[in-house]
Image (cartoon, helix red, strand yellow):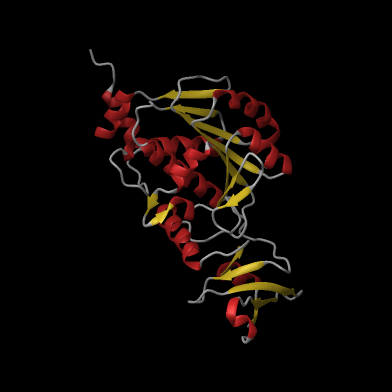
Amino acid sequence: MQLINETYYQKLVDKFGRTKNVIEIEDSNFISINTTFLEKTLTEKNSNLLLQIPSSYQNTELLFANLLLRLTELQFLEADTDPEYEVGMTLKAMQFNKRRDFELIQIFDNNDYRLREIIKGKKKANYSPAVISTTYEKLKSKYVLITGGTRKKRLEGIRTIFNQLYGVDFIPSKFKSKSIVVCKKSIWNGIASIEILESKLKDLIPSTYITKKGTEQPTINIDSALYFVPDYSTAYQCVLCKGEKIDNILLLDPKPNQLPTMIMDQSEHHFGICAITTQNFEVEGFSTWRWLKEEIDLINSL
């Protein structure tokens, strides 16, 4: 007796699988299907989704990495394409070969913005900083707002990756809204070090890890698309209570007791929820998709 209908899973693969993943691994069909489920859940927000995968599944970190890249893409598409600039902001010039950072020193009514080069180190004593006048449109296209030291090469890597994956050919200076990822620090550390096209994942996703004490640890010194937190309580106290607009919350192998509180807060903050776990449980308010090992093996063979 055949318990698994191969025709059904072939249709599932044809519709949701076989898309190009940044990480080329043997079971890309399974990963593609789940990243599609994530995207549909978080963009349509018709229901909350709980994905359950077997604890024996060998590529959990790679699956998580793809989910994070797709979640970041969603935030890129919601980014503020017309940011507001203020005197004192620091910007990195992307059009020069050498590293050059500038401070915005004046804003005029005629759409004229004046920048002064920031000189550091030994050059500071005997080097006269350049002063540049530019327009708002050039400021958006040729400079990126930064919050600290950031290499130009890293920013170019972000743009290259997301352009190659999703056709996004810009680095947002400001995200109008963000997403929260709830996971243990050990899970984040494992995912962060995954190599993707010669770069580590943590160097490709503009994000900030927030500890239980509220300490913020940015991965890249530009505005963050994602916040990583160890539990939902930290997310609530350090992000939601500060008035940040949150589009989505993704939970990676969460504890079941975190989910009911999120459901209660969802009506006020209007975020979408997707959780993926290796544990076997169900929670009211979630549509559950439980993957069996036999299903995964079949999908990956198609």
Residue 270 rendering spot, x and y as whole percentages: 65, 35
Q: Residue at x 68, y 30 (%)?
A: 265
Position of the N terminus by quadrant: top left
Is residue 267 at all visible to an observer of this figure?
A: yes
Residue 255 rendering spot, x and y as whole percentages: 54, 26
Res. 85 image quadrant? bottom right
Q: Using the image, determine if residue 240 lies above or below residue 266.
A: below
Q: Residue at x 45, y 41 (%)?
A: 67
Residue 173 rendering spot, x and y as whole percentages: 60, 60
Is residue 204 at all visible to an observer of this figure?
A: no
Q: Using the image, determine if residue 52 lies above or below residue 225.
A: above
Considering every residue shown, the one lying at the far top of the view is: 1
Considering every residue shown, the one lying at the far right of the view is: 109
Q: Residue at x 32, y 31 (%)?
A: 11
Residue 140 rendering spot, x and y as whole percentages: 60, 67
Res. 143 image quadrant? bottom right
Considering every residue shown, the one lying at the far left of the view is: 1
Position of the C terminus by quadrant: top left
Number of callouts: 0
Q: Nearer the viewer, residue 7 or 36?
A: 36
